[in-house]
Image (cartoon, grey):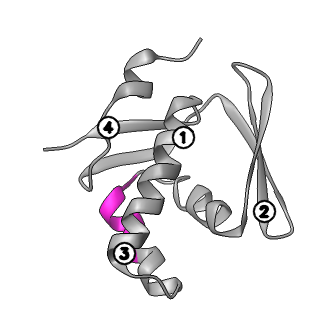
Amino acid sequence: MHNDSEKKREITLSSVVQAAPDQVAANLADEVVILNLQDEVYYGLNPVGARIWNLLQTPRTVQEVQDILVQEYEVEPHRCYTDLLELLQKLAAKGLIKIDDRK
């Protein structure tokens, strides 16, 4: 069962996010497939999601992830943040990432 506090925790630029330990991921071309060992469900990520997933293998702040993505892709920082936050919230809701709020 997933930790409900992870699902509902607010994610901010200073939040430290990383892949949760209870999953297995595999790269398929430019995409990633993740098996959540808790619910035994597979999740797929497109190439940009795969890049984010690879960045989350090391604990990083949301700001750090956003900065890397803005450098690597032609995207405005606000749009990047909005899309990144949406993906992180989905990953957290599925128990695929851990969130640590640093103040």
Q: Magenta-highlighted stretch: main secondary structure?
A: helix
Q: Secondary structure at mark 2?
A: strand
Query: Residue 64 placed where, x, y %?
Result: 35, 66
Please give the range of residues in magenta. Answer: 60-67
Question: At label 2, which amino acid type do we have?
Answer: Glu
Q: How many marks?
A: 4
Query: Residue 58 placed where, x, y %?
Result: 49, 54
Question: At label 4, which amino acid type do we have?
Answer: Asp
Quarter occupied by the N terminus: top right
Task: Please identify the quarter of the rendering in which residue 29 is found.
Answer: bottom right
| Crowd class of label 4 (few under 14; some 14 to 19; many from 20; radius 10 Å) | some
**Distance Cα–Cα, label 4 vs label 3:** 19 Å
- Front residue (pair 12, 16): 12
Instruction: Kindly indicate whether the residue at mark 3 contacts the one at mark 4 (C-beta within 8 angstroms).
Output: no
**Distance Cα–Cα, label 3 vs label 1:** 20 Å
Task: Please identify the quarter of the rendering in which residue 42 is found.
Answer: top right
Tell me the mark number nearer the camera, choosing from 4 and 2. 2
Question: At label 3, which amino acid type do we have?
Answer: Asp
Instruction: Kindly indicate whether the residue at mark 1 contacts the one at mark 2 (C-beta within 8 angstroms).
Output: no
Residue highlighted by disc 3: 67
Numbered mark located on residue 90 in the image:
1
